[in-house]
Image (cartoon, rainbow, N blue to C red):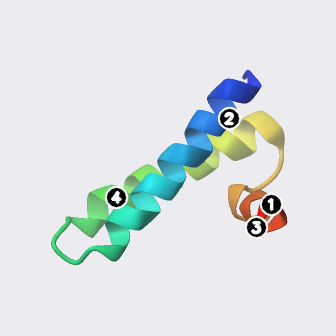
Amino acid sequence: MKNSELKKLTSQYNEFRAKKKRKHVNSFKIEEMLKEIEHRYFHETGRTLKSDLKEFA
């Protein structure tokens, strides 16, 4: 996976996390998408997405 694709995954992850905070959105579908993104990121990099986001924050 290219760096641009990894950046796109992280931006999608942040977007879904922001949507999850809103109360009027179906959180089950969003939670599934977050898990899928985390899995893809781990599969491609061997690192967890959450730990990488904390590293850059």
- Callout 2 amino acid: Leu
Indicate which label's residue lies in the foreground, 4 or 3: 3
**Is residue 52 depicted above or below 42 in this figure?**
below
Quarter occupied by residue 46: top right
Q: Gap between marks 2 and 3, in whole Å?
A: 17 Å
Position of 47 compared to 12: left or right?
right
Quarter occupied by residue 28: bottom left
- Which is nearer the eye, 39 or 17? 17
Residue 48, given in percent of the width and then of the height, sits at 75, 56
**Is residue 23 depicted above or below 46 in this figure?**
below
Q: Gap between marks 2 and 1, in whole Å?
A: 14 Å
Q: Which residue is mark 4?
A: 30
Q: Gap between marks 2 and 4, in whole Å?
A: 19 Å
Q: Which residue is mark 2?
A: 6
Q: Which residue is mark 3?
A: 57
Q: Which residue is mark 1?
A: 56
- Callout 3 amino acid: Ala
Identify the secondary structure beneath mark 3: loop
Indicate which label's residue lies in the foreground, 1 or 4: 1
Quarter occupied by residue 9: top right
Of label 1 and label 4, which has the lower sequence position? 4
Identify the secondary structure beneath mark 4: helix
- Residue at 45 percent across and 64 percent down: it is 17
Determine whether label 2 and label 3 are within 8 Å by CB: no
Q: Gap between marks 1 and 3, in whole Å?
A: 4 Å
Determine whether label 1 and label 3 are within 8 Å by CB: yes
Crowd rating for badge 1 (residues with CA inside 10 Å; few <14, some 14–19, many 20+): few
Identify the secondary structure beneath mark 1: helix
Identify the secondary structure beneath mark 2: helix
